[in-house]
Amino acid sequence: MNDDDVLNHFRAAGALLEGHFILTSGLRSPMYLQCARVLMHPQRAQALCRELADRIIAGLGPDAFDLVVSPAMGGVVVGYEMGRQLGLPAIFTERVDGEFLLRRGFEIEPGARVLMAEDIVTTGLSSRECIACIGGLGGEVVAASCLIDRSAGKADVGVPLYSLVAMEVPAYPADELPQDLAALPAVKPGSRGLK
């Protein structure tokens, strides 16, 4: 599967949006990839995560991990499907008072080798926070993964990052917008603000 094949899944699912978007990081962008729209189709989720799992196995081997951990909310479906593809348990962290924590009786065994699985990486902040949570609980994050790396490989999450597509999508601070982007109304996509 090449970059176009992956992005065609997003296009076909109506998940590649254009306009003026406020990202989770607070940056602004003319493009938004709505992973939930792709992942709502089990066949697409399976195909994309199978490809990602194959790339990770090719790089690290089939027995590199004991557990998949993802940050809620965006990473939950990807984490589950990555766990399914790798034959591993999959759990997720949740934000409580601004910090990622494990809830719901989830545990990480000390020394467990973990794949941190995300939907999209932009700045890497959420990934780093999730990885810090895992490490604080005694897990060893061997690698991170995402469907789309919006930083084109520039985001440093502290461990090797595997992605299906690494693309540079411009992102700007709110006070440094290009004129054409500033002329459009800003929308907060994701679970809040975009229907």
Image: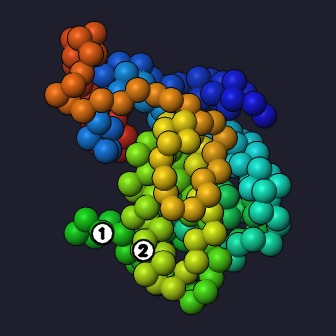
122 relative to 141 in the view: left or right: left
How far, Cα to Cα, is label 2 from label 1?
8 Å
The amino acid on which the numbered mark 2 sits, given as a three-letter code, is Cys
Of all residues shown, which one is farthest toward the bottom? Answer: 110
Whether residue 46 is visible here, answered yes or no, is: no
Q: Residue 99 shows which numbered tag? A: 1
| 2 and 1 marks in contact (CB < 8 Å) | yes
Ranked by sequence position, the earlier of labels 2 and 1 is: 1
Residue 94 in percent (x, y) is at 38, 67
Pick the front one: 10 or 43: 10
Quadrant position of the N terminus in the picture:
top right
Horizontal and vertical percent position of residue 105: 46, 84
Rendered image: mark on residue 133? 2
| Quadrant, the C terminus | top left
Callout 1 secondary element: strand
Rendered residue at 44%/42% (across/down): 122
